[in-house]
Amino acid sequence: MAQLIADRRDVDFVLHEQIGTVDHELFEEFNKKTIDLIVSEARNLAIKEILPTFKDGDEIGCTLENGEVTTPDSFKRAWELYCEGEWLAMCDDPEVGGQGMPKTVGCAALEYMVGANSAFMLYYGMTHGAAKLVEAFGDETQKKLYMKKMFAGEWGGTMLLTESEAGSDVGALTTTATLKEDGTYAINGSKIFISAGEHDLCENIIHPVLARIEGAPAGTRGISLFLVPKYHVNEDGSLGDFNNVVCTGLEEKMGIHGNATASLSLGEKGECIGTLLGEENKGMPEMFQMMNEARAFVGMQGFAVASASYMYALDYARTRLQGRSMTAGKDATAKSVPIIQHPDVKRQLMNMKVYTEGMRSLIYYYGKCSDIVHTTGDETLKAETAALIEVLTPIVKGYITDKSLEICSHGVQVYGGYGYISEYPVEQLMRDSRIFMIYEGTNGIQAMDLLGRKLAMNKGASFAYFIDQIKKTVAEAKETEGVEALAEKVAHVVSRLEELAADMGQRSRSDKALNAYAFAHPFLEITGDVTFAWMLLWRAMVAAPKLAKKVGSLERDAVAAKAAKNKDAAFYDGQIQSAKFFINTILPSTCGKMDAVFEGDTCLEDIQELSFGSK
């Protein structure tokens, strides 16, 4: 299988030319040379060790026998090398065993690793998120016993939220916690859909579990969070007896077969003990820290899989000879050409290109925002940027994963019939990508979050700050030769988004609330479209002066002649063409979607349940 995951030139462009890293003493050792070395090492690990697990995970998968799960043998070597390289805590504080690197750099490293095998990297995602919970809310004993071993990858982690009857309505859970004389809790209940819930990559697994203490209020207000280890941990850190966290089943899934999606029973076959993490009845706010990290990671999964699909499709289209050029006319001697020369294939590749590039820029920017919050001494900037992260989260999770499936579908289509065959990787990538739209709150829930919470956050100031960041780029682009006209078009759409946001916010708080939420997902898609127009315009704005310098002008014939021979010129020209394609051919559809949302047709409210059809 070809070793294709991400476009290194584009990774370097976003890291060093567009987004950049935060200039702070905490990151002073991470100069360009060091960053490039880190990305190269991540790429090598991804290609040499993680990518070979891609097919194994899909074809061998995970097996359950007597309550124990076995992963493919190749996973064990990859996990060992991954942990030896201290990649799991690469962006965390050195005091907890981390490397302290900027999130932007971590995003580049993760892109390669997740793109190599998203199912394998779920073991990382769950473990890191659980370790951060212990770091944030654990007492000194919990931190001493669990935290460093989890950040080192010696012990795994999960998140136990969902139950069969509750589904996304976490407040309806039935798992209970009964206080014991020694201050611990007896945990009883069952959880489902637990990614990395049981496996043999680590000697212990630490489960953050949502449960209700007896007598606590109903709903989410009465939920607490507990740490429940698979094996008890003694005071000296050694492992004790089995804690009766029993794996009762593994889901047979459409994709990500290499990750154990488990059903777990706690306390059914013997006492299961947990310790309170944080405060009583504060479980949901505490767990949201992990959920928000998980949502960002799911966005990364969607992006990395889409990037891999694009790279495979691009390579295939450049090498697959089929059909004569449309300009060959009736020349019977004309030879077959690479399919990338056919307009419809080129159209699909362009769709894949622009969305992949928009994803990369947005995810790295999201990472940089986290670095700003972590390092700035300006309290106003810190608060505004933290709120901006919250506004961007449903876009990173929801919009990116929606588009990921589209990109992976294009990847299959570019391959034609071969794309539907498991011999080629794009078939598996498409199956693997489908779950990302469901993970960590379905994309419908992400849309409701954007409309119901993020628009109103800080009385609308947070969404306004998000709009202001776009306007700053647009204003600069208007002064940049070669992209002025594109900037004007984006400015118009941004103004309409402001009007639509105000209208939707007002509607959602009125007797037309049902109508507003019927259009929540289209509103998320519109906001995502505008965000990607921002990212792609920003790219073009950076690229245009550099292209002009290389060519001597931005005159089209001169640029085309230079780009045909010079990789740098071709790359910068490609950034401008990406922005043109998105802004000139996709963004007009966004305006049409805005028209529909403004109109607010009531058919979804008016249609009766029986009108959908009968048995």
Image (cartoon, rainbow, N blue to C red):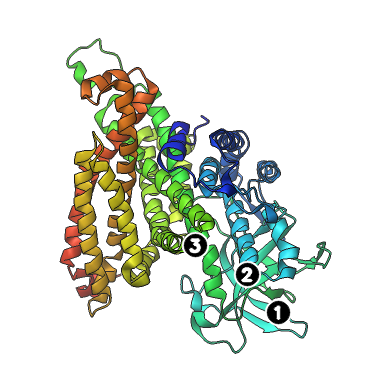
Q: How many marks?
A: 3
Give the mark nearest the N terminus, 3 or 2. 2
Q: Is residue 40 above or below residue 197?
A: above
The residue identified by callout 3 is 292
Horizontal and vertical percent for residue 530?
Answer: 28, 52
Determine whether, in the image, residue 506 is placed left or right of residue 175.
Answer: left
Q: CA distance from mark 3 to mark 2?
A: 15 Å
Instruction: State whether residue 38 appears in this view.
Output: yes
The quarter holding residue 522 reads bottom left
Horizontal and vertical percent for residue 329?
Answer: 17, 17
Farthest residue toward the top?
A: 333
Q: Neighbour class for label 3 at 10 Å: few (<14), some, many (≥20)?
A: some
Farthest residue toward the bottom?
A: 215
**In front of the other: label 1 or label 3?**
3
| Mark 3: amino acid | Asn
> At 24% from the left edge and 67% from the top edge, which residue is drawn?
502
Label ID, residue 137: 2
Horizontal and vertical percent for residue 220?
Answer: 50, 79
The quarter holding residue 190 reads bottom right
Label ID, residue 186: 1
> At 39% from the left edge and 48% from the top edge, which residue is drawn?
405
| Mark 2: amino acid | Phe
Q: On the rendered image, what quadrant is the C terminus found in?
A: bottom left
- Secondary structure beneath dot 1 equals strand
- Secondary structure beneath dot 2 equals helix
**In front of the other: label 1 or label 2?**
2
Give the mark nearest the N terminus, 1 or 2. 2
Horizontal and vertical percent for residue 103?
Answer: 53, 49
Q: Is residue 420 above or below residue 295?
A: above
